[in-house]
Image (tube, rainbow, N blue to C red):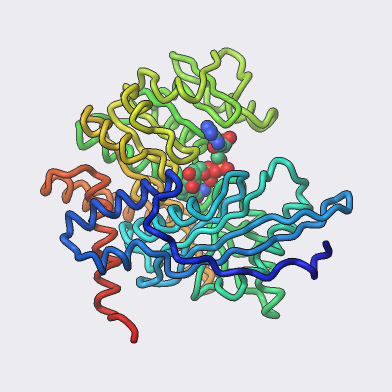
Amino acid sequence: MSDDASPPSAALPAATPALSSAPLATAQQQLARAVEILGYDAGLHEVLATPRRELRVAVPLRRDDGRVQVFTGYRVQHNISRGPGKGGLRYAPGVDVDEVRALAMWMTWKCAVVDVPYGGAKGGVTIDPHAHSASELERVTRRYTSEIMPIIGPERDIMAPDIGTDERTMAWVMDTYSVNHGFTIPAVTTGKPLAVGGSLGRPTATSQGVVHTARAALRADGVELSEVSAAVQGFGKVGSHAARLLHEAGTRVVAVSDEHGGVRRDDGLDVPALLDHVQRTGSVTGLPDADPVTNADLLALDVDLLVPAAVEGVLDGETAARVKARWVVEGANGPTTGEGDRVLAERGVVVVPDILANAGGVVVSYFEWVQANQAYWWTEGEIAERLEQRMLASHASVAALAHAESVTLREAAMTIGVRRVAEAHLIRGLYP
Ligand SMILES: NC(=O)c1ccc[n+]([C@@H]2O[C@H](COP(=O)([O-])OP(=O)(O)OC[C@H]3O[C@@H](n4cnc5c(N)ncnc54)[C@H](O)[C@@H]3O)[C@@H](O)[C@H]2O)c1
């Protein structure tokens, strides 16, 4: 099939209440609980639960050897009551529309919790990025961008990196969008390289936010990061910087993992050596002077702080029952299922939820978009200071509500996020 013969893009039917995938089930349960706390009626609940706009597109790729293969891509805008959609683009073999719906919904609440003027969106292509050359990934990215072009843009929906994509991907998206409009439009994506309007501090922002909220959660119990041990699951853009920043804060990082497996050293891993090792080999596995550990066992290690920073659903009822950490700070989106949450709460584990803990990325994405719109660039110090202020203020309001209402940090964060979105929706009114 030639590129021109690709099937037309198709709109999907509206999300049904049926919980057909684990991340979406988790996201819907979390929303239902917030709606219950807030006392909203069924109509408002349905508005908040239903994605505003969804697009499924065919992405035909001419492989390097001349064959043509067709992939499926999605862009879901869950809610745009508070501003344009905002959310990452994921390349992974398991991407499906329900996962993208869940991730888009979490973006809505996250942007509201840290009070950036965005709604929530997410995109994905069902593709294994490791199985393709850079030039194939570039063609996939450009074709996907051109297929979803009618619904994205600096005032409509702004993309950022997620699993399997990076700043180079964002440069291709920005270039494709710009070339089709005839001029350079940097604010259509965030997480871009500095050379094309990226922001200082963006590559480490999510991990910085994880460390700020971890520090705040520990301090609420009178403990410092320098006094604790930690395990980090996932060693990509979020996990690797989180491990490094924790190490720099004096935390004993005893275990890390990636999709190939993990390594542990009870006296503490040499994190700079680990970063070198990953740079050379592409994986944390095989690190000298460390023992192997599986991803499942890493979650159950005898550490104080656990940072899941890989994929959804790793802490379910069963794995949560084995967690020994006192604090779980969610670098990943949706790492804890509803049942996992219940088990952790019962056992007194403090969970700093994803929509707060990993919001540093979207905060600095917002800074990048503001800088691009003004064509005026801030210093690294200004960005770091404003990120820290916003993360600590957001954590403080979530923690205060949790304390006042005797609810978990997740319930408090969801309540704040959902209330802000509902307020915007109600003030704007229902058209027509
Ligand atoms: N990049 C951001 O700015 C950002 C912001 C907020 C949230 N997040 C979330 O953080 C998580 C990680 O994103 P990222 O950007 O670091 O992605 P990434 O692709 O850079 O890294 C993902 C890491 O997880 C590992 N991994 C994948 N599957 C795994 C599995 N089944 N078990 C253990 N490890 C596995 C990979 O090997 C890799 O080390 C995702 O949930 C993402 O949605 C990312």
Q: Is residue 243 above or below residue 106?
A: above
In the picture provided, is 70 more to the left or to the right than 191?
A: right
The residue at 34%/87% (across/down) is: 432
In the picture provided, is 75 more to the left or to the right than 70?
A: left
Tell me residue 392's x, y (percent). 29, 49
Outermost residue, right side = 66
Q: Is residue 23 visible?
A: yes
Tell me residue 388's x, y (percent). 35, 50
Q: Is residue 5 above or below residue 313?
A: below
Q: Is residue 21 above or below residue 243?
A: below
In the picture provided, is 392 more to the left or to the right than 151?
A: left
Total numbered labels: 0
Tell me residue 3's x, y (percent). 80, 66
The residue at 39%/27% (across/down) is: 250
Tell me residue 110's x, y (percent). 36, 56
Q: Quadrant of residue 128?
A: top right
For the N terminus, give its image quadrant.
bottom right
Q: Is residue 363 visible?
A: no
Q: Viewer-proximal residue, 95 or 249?
A: 95
Outermost residue, bottom side = 432
In the picture provided, is 184 more to the left or to the right than 218?
A: right
The residue at 35%/43% (across/down) is: 212
The residue at 33%/38% (across/down) is: 214
Q: Viewer-proximal residue, 367 or 380?
A: 367
